[in-house]
Amino acid sequence: MEVAQEHNRLKFFPVMMYAIVMGLSGLTITYQKAALWLDFPFLIGEVLMYITTAVFVIVSFIYLKKFFKYKAAVKNEFSHPVRINFFAAISISMLMLAIIYKESYPVISAIVWYPGTLLHFYLTMHTISFWINENQHMDHSNPAWFIPIVGNVLVPVAGVGFVDLGILVYFFSVGIFFWIILFAVILNRIIFHNQMAVKFMPTLFILIAPPAVGFIAYFKMFEVIDVFALMLFNMAIFFTILVAFMYKNFIKIKFFISWWAFVFPIAAMAISTMLMYNQNGSTSLLLFSYFMIAIVTIIVFIVTYQTLLHIKKEEICIKE
């Protein structure tokens, strides 16, 4: 009986679990940059680096086990109109690990970055082809659509020095273009159609990520704060204020793994704020950096506690 239950839990282990890796990666990079620019202890980022790597290995091992034992279940996820978008969380996790290791261990960073980039390129093409070949319902659209397509803006962040700049600009261009297109689609759905399912409400935080990560990627490639960079940074601030203004929409939501969608965008905002502070030395940006670091840390503690609690209650990895 216990064996059957274990196997069933494995069968319903969702690809969305990679959102945990994305969240922890965001926290890790936040503290790495805080050590670099705000004199935080380097040890925090170092410890988080190993924790994040371990979680990535564990999640990947379990999902591979699911793939070999329940291929049909994985295939169903890969053809699901909503869950297909979370497969890109695998490649995003790899790209974020490449960012984490870039400064200290560039060889490890390259080993993760190249396959992560190729996988993300494939998932981008596959997802768009899926959307074109399979009629999508408006109710299926949600900010998670950004992950496989707009996630391309993450490629240049760790990619500088690994490949020609033109290749990095290609990924950046694709991500920014589809950010505008998909944002229009999702805004249309939110305003004129049915509200999103409660479990996907946290994905609204993903709206922060494209301009925040886009700003970081743009600076990494060109090392300049021009009008376009300022537009991206200010759009990231706008979406951060917007989701904060809508806080009542989130405080009473029942726990789902999608809560991890809170973390990565907030971390991206914290990192972009520290980067902007490092460039112009504004006191207001320094204070905002400390505030964002505190927020992302608190959110990670809350979400981690809730995740472990619901794992103990066996309320995760069950049939919906």
Image (cartoon, helix red, strand yellow):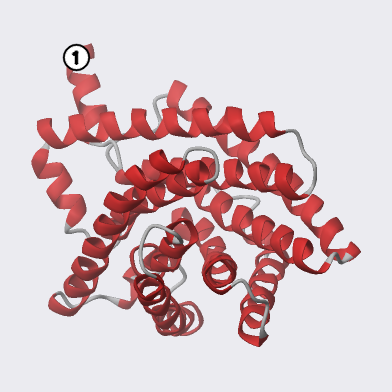
Q: Establish if 229 lies above or below 20.
A: below
The image shows residue 119 at horizontal and vertical percentages of 25, 55
Secondary structure of the residue carrying tag 1 is helix
Work out whether residue 81 can be spotted: no
The image shows residue 137 at horizontal and vertical percentages of 27, 75
Q: Quadrant of the C terminus?
A: top left
Considering depth in this image, is 19 or 215 the residue closer to the camera? 215
Query: Residue at (81%, 69%) from the top-left corner?
Result: 280
Query: Residue at (75%, 33%) from the top-left corner?
Result: 41
* Residue under pointer 1: 3
Query: Residue at (76%, 67%) from the top-left corner?
Result: 279
Work out whether residue 75 can be spotted: yes
Q: Quadrant of the N terminus?
A: top left
Picture quadrant of residue 2 = top left
Q: Establish if 233 lies above or below 261.
A: below
Query: Residue at (39%, 53%) from the top-left corner?
Result: 92
Question: Left or right of 140: which side holds 225?
Answer: right
The image shows residue 102 at horizontal and vertical percentages of 49, 46
Question: Left or right of 181: which side holds 219?
Answer: right
Question: Left or right of 118: which side holds 212?
Answer: right
Q: How many marks?
A: 1
Considering depth in this image, is 19 or 47 the residue closer to the camera? 47
Farthest residue to the right: give it.
283
Picture quadrant of residue 47 = top right
The residue under label 1 is which amino acid type? Answer: Val
**Mark 1 crowdedness (10 Å alpha carbons): few <14, some 14-19, many ≥20:** few
The image shows residue 208 at horizontal and vertical percentages of 58, 66
Q: Establish if 303 lies above or below 231.
A: above
